[in-house]
Amino acid sequence: MIDIVCCPTPFLVGLLSSSLPKLKELPVEEALMVNLGSDRFIRQVKYILKCCHAQALERKSELINQDSDSDSDDECNTLNGLVSEVFIRFFVETVGHYSLFLTQNEKGERAFQREAFRKSVASKSIRRFLEVFMESQMFAGFIQDRELRKCRAKGLFEQRVEQYLEELPDTEQSGVNKFLRGLGEE
């Protein structure tokens, strides 16, 4: 997961403090690095974060009250796996219903129905999150990739989305809002 930090698109990544030496060896550009355990910047960028991003970082800092002192590779791998699972689950449950809003025209071209996608979420706070997230380069690349795909290859994300949508009852608007309702109220 540490290799993701070198990607050119915007990411919010959580890493264990034991990964910091590896991170410092990588060619990371334009990254804000914050040690949430000590509430200090490891590396700052030249521009100032938008207020909403700064507040989000502060909230995350408040939520983290444990510091992993483990040097065990097995324990680090387990924790890295858990962090990855949290991110995958979050994206599955917030944007996993995207495929319901990919339409196909007469020419076979796919188009994403942005507003219908955003408005399909019952939670106001998740809709607000989607408003901002849908403007990101990460989301634009994700949707563009899905629009241009000729075959429906199923990577880990698509497999988890399919599983998630199947688990939800049919009464939940095609299975997209059960978790989203609860997520916005937390």
Image: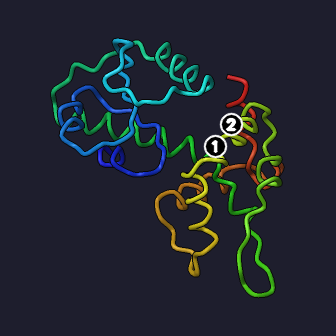
Relative height, residue 49 to residue 92 (above, below): above
Residue 54: quarter of image: top right
Q: Which residue is mark 1?
A: 133
Residues at badges 1 and 2 in contact (C-beta under 8 Å)? yes
Q: Point out the image quarter for the C terminus.
A: top right
Marks 1/2: CA–CA distance: 6 Å
Where residue 166 appears, as percent x and y from the top left, is 66, 57
Classify mark 1: residues with Cα within 10 Å, few (<14), some (14-19) or many (20+): some
Residue 70: quarter of image: top left
Q: Amino acid at mark 1?
A: Phe
Q: Is residue 29 left or right of residue 182?
A: left
Classify mark 2: residues with Cα within 10 Å, few (<14), some (14-19) or many (20+): some
For the point 64% across and 53% down, which residue is it? 96
Residue 34: quarter of image: top left
For the point 69% across and 55% down, which residue is it? 97
Relative height, residue 124 to residue 142 (above, below): above
User: Helix, strand or loop at disc 1?
Assistant: helix
Q: Which residue is mark 2?
A: 129
Where residue 142 appears, as percent x and y from the top left, is 57, 59
In the image, 120 versus 140, the foreground residue is 140
In the image, 18 versus 171, the foreground residue is 18
Q: Point out the image quarter for the N terminus.
A: top left
Q: Amino acid at mark 2?
A: Phe
For the point 81% across and 39% down, which residue is it? 122
Q: Residue furthest bottom?
A: 107
User: Helix, strand or loop at disc 2?
Assistant: helix
Where residue 152 appears, as percent x and y from the top left, is 57, 75
